[in-house]
Image (cartoon, rainbow, N blue to C red):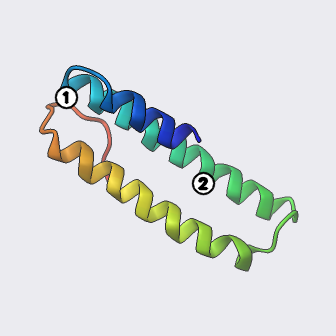
Amino acid sequence: MSISANIAEGAGRNSDRDFAHFLEQAYASAMELASHLFLVVDLNYVDEANIDQIMRKLDVVAARIVSLNRSLAVKGSKVKL
């Protein structure tokens, strides 16, 4: 929810610079989710095979966030892939 909420909030801002900031927050939320997924595997709550498909989808989402941020052409963006 945090990923999409940050993208939506940024899209509602008045400048590309503000939007880029919220895209960076969305990317950070994606990385936080990845960390949580690794943790549930490490704690043996879920088998790694069950997480693989989710991780692949999360990689696609992260790449799309990076592409959208790059399309804004805001200098100094921290999001890199």
At mark 2, the secondary structure is helix
Q: Which amino acid does label 2 sit on?
A: Ala
| Rendered view: 53 above or below 26 | below
Q: Position of residue 9 (x, y in %)?
A: 41, 28
58 vs 79, left or right, is right
| Rendered view: 49 above or below 41 | below
Q: Which residue is the site of mark 2?
A: 34
Instruction: Please report the residue visible at 20 percent of the width from the left and 30 percent of the height from the top.
Output: 76
Instruction: Please report the residue visible at 25 percent of the width from the left and 53 percent of the height from the top.
Output: 67
Quarter of the image for the C terminus: give it. bottom left
Q: Position of residue 50 (x, y in %)?
A: 73, 75
Instruction: Please report the residue visible at 56 percent of the width from the left and 37 percent of the height from the top.
Output: 2
- Tag 2 or tag 1, which sits nearer the N-term? 1
Q: Which residue is the site of mark 1?
A: 16
Q: Position of residue 33 (x, y in %)?
A: 61, 49
Which residue is more in the foreground, 9 or 22? 9
| Rendered view: 76 above or below 65 | above
Instruction: Please report the residue visible at 79 percent of the width from the left and 58 percent of the height from the top.
Output: 40
